[in-house]
Amino acid sequence: MSTSRSFYPVVLLLVAPILLRGQEDSIALRYGTTITAEDLMRHLSIIASDAYEGRETGMRGQKMAAEYLREQFMKMGIAPVPGGEARGVKDGYFLPFELDVDRPGGIVVEVAGSSFRFMDDFFYFSEKVARDTKLQGVTMVAGISPSDSMFQEIPVKGRAVLWVEPSSDRSEGSGGYVPDPAFLQRLSVMARSASERGATALFFLTDQYDGLKENYAHYITSTRMHLSQSKEAERPVPPEGMQTIIAGRGLGEVLLDRAGTSWKKVQKSGRRGSFSDTADVLLELHYTQLRGRSSSEDVLAFIPGSVRPGEVVVVTAHYDHIGMKDGEVYNGADDDGSGTVALLEMAQAFAKAKAEGHGPLRSILFMPVSGEEKGLLGSEYYSEHPVFPLDSTVADLNIDMIGRTDSAHIGTAPYVYVIGSDRLSSELHAINEAANRNYVGLDLDYTYNAADDPNRFYYRSDHYNFAKHGIPSIFYFSGVHADYHGPHDEVDRIRPDLLEERARLVFYTAWALSQRPERITVDKLKEGSTGR
């Protein structure tokens, strides 16, 4: 993975402000410096508190956060969206959207008259069964290194594959269960290979089941959400395909017993070398779709431009998080409380500038979005039902996690990851670099902007729903840390100084985009909707 960063000689950093800042720059500086660590942390201590219950989409805490954001925009003197009702905006600031809510657990496995249920006997990461399925025949496999060609010589077409993991001593340590870091990779490779060879189901039999289930419980039991369709018949159902199931000892032993063997025998054969065998076993997968309805809302704060009001610069940050688990609140101070409060402070700076006669030439839309943690749903809804035309949208600046330091930057100079700035517009990239050079001086790290970035961060935050429509976008990010999506992503772990600097960089870039005589050009190929 290549890394490209912006470094500037010390002398240039010292003299650039003197050489490059004219009157307009001094005005930008006046309002940019109103974004302070103190104000950022004041907002963050509220929306990332236990009172907001983790801000899960559609739940009470998310609604509370939406109301808090609206109240703040009103206090700033930002008027309701003009003609809001006709544009789908409710109460002047809310863009509501309806959601289909799928609860996992609709699959029941039946073997020899015994039923096995989700989270009691097995779990999975996604449902692929859209109807009841009878499977006749299994293939047992052990001791084979996972690879794309692993089932080339093994008969799996039309069968269920029973993969038996070797015994493991990864149970409980001083810090509790620690999953095998290669588990998900093995599972992914095996599932892809088995599916490509025509298998109908993959049962991953492991004695780590209890630890794995506990480790991934919050994710695997979380509801899945989709934007609701207008007609009942159009509501999405799980895609048909090979179902992958992680099974515990009870289900595994019954399956193997019906195949005329045992867990111990298969593991022993696997330790001696590669092992596979087939058996005539009937098992059934019964599926019931567990679905309900919910709703959420994006929050809109619109500051009209004085010269080109029809051209709009959008600033986004998702204000939702993942809610609660077993009574513990996942507060998401960094993800994405940090981006949300940065957006709030930017809105206040622009509102103050406009009130004092220095407003933007083109319009600014500050839009905290919901549903990001459920699949970028709030920004997807906006991109499909835009309040302001997408062909008049100049750029999207998206802020998602800018309050911490990742392991790659311990002890380094202040930095921020910049993702997507040059994907569609070389001008956007240059503007952001100039804003950083002239005002902030962060180390701009482009590691995750690489086309071959295995993390695919470019496709994993709300800017992508603008980029896929050809709108130049930047994703500002400070990297993943040990508390990512965990219960310890708390306010006291935020770096206020870095949060302030990064928020100011986004402000100065937005300021330049809103004030330049011409809108930036799209001079690169439009991003295709290639998936996240």
Image: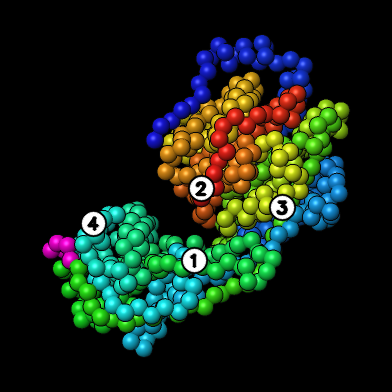
Residue type indicated by callout 3: His
Residue type indicated by callout 4: Ser
The circle drawn on residue 239 is 1
Marks 1 and 3, the one that precedes in the sequence: 1
Residue 464 to residue 242: above or below: above
Q: Give the x, y percent position of residue 376.
A: 60, 52
Mark pair 4, 1: CA separation:
28 Å
Residue 188 to residue 507: above or below: below
Residue type indicated by callout 1: Pro
Q: Give the x, y percent position of residue 523.
A: 60, 29
The circle drawn on residue 530 is 2
Q: Residues within 10 Å of mark 3 (few under 14, many from 20)?
A: some
Q: What secondary structure is found at the residue carrying circle 3?
A: loop
Q: Residue at x 84, y 54 (%)?
A: 86
Q: Which residues are magenta?
A: 270-275
Mark pair 3, 4: CA separation:
48 Å
Disc 2 vs disc 1: Cβ atoms closer than 8 Å? no
The reply to whether residue 476 is visible in this rendering is no
**Residue assigned mark 3:** 385
Q: Quadrant of residue 331?
A: bottom right
Q: Is residue 462 left or right of residue 30?
A: left
